[in-house]
């Protein structure tokens, strides 16, 4: 009996001791070691060469990838204490990353006879810049940049800061320009960078260019167009409108301002009764505005719209006046069309057949099918302010 009582007493003492140990184990916190993740390995891939349409001018702005963080989560363990778990051997990081071999070859731009271009012009209202044109204009998230593939044998990119400097892309019948409009003295500069020639998903060729404007505001010249950056067609121009089957075109743009800015994104055509004429009073200039700001208005906007019609699935308003800054003061008739719905935004994409536009101009009695299409280009006019425009333009003239 005494032996039984002793055994029972010893059992109670052991149970109490185990209870205290169990309580201690449940209050213990275990901090697991963070395992290496492949987030610390940065994949390296070749970037598409950027392209800009020097005035005539589209780009890819390289960005620096941010280093991903490895987050270690502290987990409270409720399991009993066990032998320490051996840490896994860290996965060794690669000692070097082999850069992919560039497939693109750079060719020298061939010198050819300079191609003259007309000076794009447009009039604006004589008003002070409003606060709505100030500040940095945000890029709408809806703008989608079409997929493109760099052309392997395209010339290397070129910066053009000199007035009327050009880059000829003769193999594709295109010309990128950094143009100066001689309307007034100006303090400031515009640099146009030709970035690349690319092929779009539908097989069309496009040019990327960047226009970097830094033009000081001046009350006396605020309404003067001072610079232009664009891409012009050099193949199949100087042909009769009636002999042209189509002019498939597209424009993708994105503008960022760091000050008040006046300017636009537009397509520009010049027709005349004679081939090779883009300067006389007999010529007729046509502009299509996609984006504009800084209170810029089309020539003779105060006279109201001359017509409204539908093209490419949307409504357009037509304005018309005479630009007396051209043809030695005799003036040139300028017809401008703008979307009835308004500005298409600081970032956007447009595509269509410009032949449809010219057919409508025939219907409106502005020209006839016997007029020659002597100039076709797309880009931006710059009046004042600090702004960067990234552009990708596709345009060609296809004959019957």
Image (cartoon, rainbow, N blue to C red):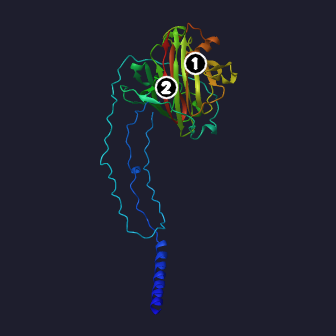
Q: Which residue lies furthest to the front in this view?
A: 1
* Residue carrying label 2: 393
Q: Which of marks 2 and 1 is nearer the N terminus?
A: 1
Residue at image position (34%, 29%) is 104
Horizontal placement of 397 versus 36: left or right? right
**Residue 77, image x, y percentages:** 47, 66
Q: Nearer the viewer, residue 334 or 323?
A: 334
**Corner quadrant of residue 169:** top left
From mark 2 to mark 1, how far is it between C-alphas?
A: 18 Å
Q: Is mark 2 on a helix, strand or loop?
A: strand
Q: Nearer the viewer, residue 383 or 238?
A: 238
Name the element at disc 1.
strand
Q: Which mark is residue 306?
A: none
* Residue 138 against residue 394 in the figure, above or below: below
Callout 2–callout 1 Cβ contact below 8 Å: no
Q: Position of residue 14 (x, y in %)?
A: 45, 82
Residue 110: horizontal and vertical position, in percent?
35, 21
Q: Name the residue under label 1.
A: 286
Q: Which residue lies furthest to the bottom in this view?
A: 2
Residue 326 shows in this picture: no
Decide which of 160, 172 is in the foreground and name it: 172
User: Residue 90: percent from the left, percent from the top?
Assistant: 34, 56
Q: In this view, does 29 lie above or below 271?
A: below
The mark tally for this picture is 2
| Farthest top residue in view | 370
Which of 184/277 is in front? 277
């Amino acid at each position: 009996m005494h032996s039984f009582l002793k055994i029972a007493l010893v059992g109670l003492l052991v149970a109490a001791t185990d209870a205290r140990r169990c309580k201690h184990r449940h209050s213990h916190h275990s901090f697991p070691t963070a395992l290496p993740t492949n987030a610390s390995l940065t994949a390296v891939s070749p970037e598409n060469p950027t392209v800009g349409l020097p005035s005539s001018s589209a780009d890819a702005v390289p960005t620096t990838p941010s280093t991903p963080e490895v987050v270690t989560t502290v987990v409270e363990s409720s399991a009993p204490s066990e032998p320490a778990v051996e840490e896994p051997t860290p996965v060794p990081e690669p000692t070097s990353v082999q850069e992919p071999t560039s497939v693109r070859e750079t060719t020298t731009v061939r010198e050819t006879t300079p191609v003259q271009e007309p000076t794009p012009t447009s009039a604006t209202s004589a008003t002070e810049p409003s606060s709505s044109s100030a500040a940095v204009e945000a890029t709408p998230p809806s703008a989608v940049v079409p997929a493109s593939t760099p052309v392997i044998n395209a010339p290397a990119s070129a910066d053009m800061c000199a007035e009327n400097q050009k880059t000829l892309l003769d193999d594709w019948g295109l010309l990128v320009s950094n143009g100066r409009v001689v309307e007034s003295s100006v303090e400031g500069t515009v640099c146009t960078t030709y970035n690349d020639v690319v092929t779009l998903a539908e097989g069309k060729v496009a040019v990327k260019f960047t226009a970097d404007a830094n033009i000081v505001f001046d009350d006396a010249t605020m309404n003067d167009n001072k610079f232009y950056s664009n891409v012009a067609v050099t193949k199949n121009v100087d042909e009769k409108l009636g002999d042209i089957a189509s002019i498939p075109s597209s424009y993708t743009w994105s503008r960022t301002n760091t000050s008040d800015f006046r300017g636009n994104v537009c397509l520009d055509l010049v027709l005349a009764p004679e081939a090779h004429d883009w300067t006389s009073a007999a010529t007729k200039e046509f502009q299509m505005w996609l984006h504009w700001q800084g209170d810029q208005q089309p020539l003779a906007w105060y006279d109201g719209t001359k017509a409204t019609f539908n093209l490419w699935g949307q409504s357009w308003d037509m304005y018309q006046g005479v630009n007396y800054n051209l043809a030695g003061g005799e003036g040139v008739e300028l017809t401008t069309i703008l979307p009835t719905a308004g500005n298409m935004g600081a970032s956007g994409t447009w595509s269509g057949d410009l032949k449809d536009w010219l057919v409508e101009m025939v219907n409106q009695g502005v020209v006839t099918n016997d007029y020659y299409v002597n100039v076709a280009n797309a880009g931006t006019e710059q009046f004042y302010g600090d702004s960067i425009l990234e552009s990708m333009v596709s345009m060609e003239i296809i004959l019957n």
